[in-house]
Amino acid sequence: MKTPTHRSVKASLPLAALLALASCGVIPTPPVALPDATIPLGNTALSMGQVVYMDRDVLGGSTLAAALQGLSISGNATYAATGGTLSSLKVYVRSSLRDLGSSCTALPVVPPAYACSPANEAAQAIGTVSVQAGASRAFTLSGPALDAAARTGHGYFGVQVTGGQALQGESLSLTSLKAQAKF
């Protein structure tokens, strides 16, 4: 059996450091562009603080390799207002809208949407987006629920109004979306 020399050990140190960093999830992947998304808001006074999920898969089959973690989605949010005062939204994600449980109810809207109790959705929270009517605001979303959704290739976003109020016909546009993960 050959004993490693001082030189071979020294030469392998950068590789060992790289592998150690990779196992800690600190090496970012190159950003990947995602398609823009528009979320219809409706009259948020009717949802009374509930988390409202639209039956629209924003990940559309794009999966995250199991070795990757710490997925983040960043971009710009623009609130198209017609008189509402919306200023902030808490964002949630689920990999499926099946079997939502008794804390969620179907809303009588098209496309289908579901209102869920925020107390039961805490594990699905991925961040907060601040908005201003007609202005583009940068945001970043991340968290274990986003990693889990990306691994399945399906992501249904939910929003909970935390500041102001949206009115029927208003929407939130998410543009310049980029996804990035870490090894």
Image (cartoon, rainbow, N blue to C red):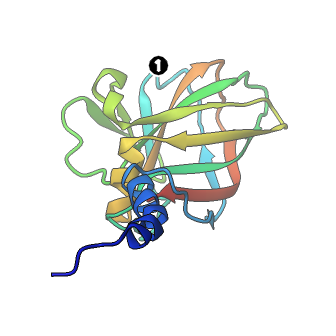
Tell me, yes or no, if residue 62 can be seen here. no
Q: Residue at 40% across / 62% down in the picture?
A: 16
Q: Which residue is mark 1?
A: 48
Task: Look at label 1 and name its amino acid.
Answer: Met
Question: Does the image show residue 39?
Answer: yes
Name above or below for residue 12 compared with residue 25: below
Please state, as top left, top right, bottom left or bottom right, where the N terminus lies in the image.
bottom left
Secondary structure of residue under mark 1? loop
Residue 14 x/y as whole percent: 49, 63
Residue beneath the point at 40% across and 73% down: 8
Residue that extends furthest to the left in the rendered view of this protein: 1
Q: Left or right? Give the position of 107 relative to 35.
A: left
Pointer 1: residues within 10 angstroms few (<14), some, or many (20+)? Answer: few
Pick the residue in front: 71 or 37.
71
Look at 24% across and 42% down and name the residue there: 100
The one nearer the camera, 159 or 46, is 159
Q: Quadrant of the C terminus?
A: bottom left
- Residue name at image x 80 percent, y 32 percent: 133
Residue 15 rendering spot, x and y as whole percentages:
44, 66
Among the 4 quarters of the image, the one containing residue 41: top right
**Where residue 45 sits: x, y (%)?**
55, 20
The quarter of the displayed image where residue 32 is located: bottom right
User: In this view of the protein, which residue sits in the foreground, 82 or 94?
Assistant: 94
Left or right: 31 in relation to 82: left
User: Given the current orientation, which residue lies at the most extreme right position?
Assistant: 134
The answer to which of 6 and 130 lies nearer the viewer is 6
Q: Is residue 26 above or below residue 65?
A: above
Figure disc tally: 1
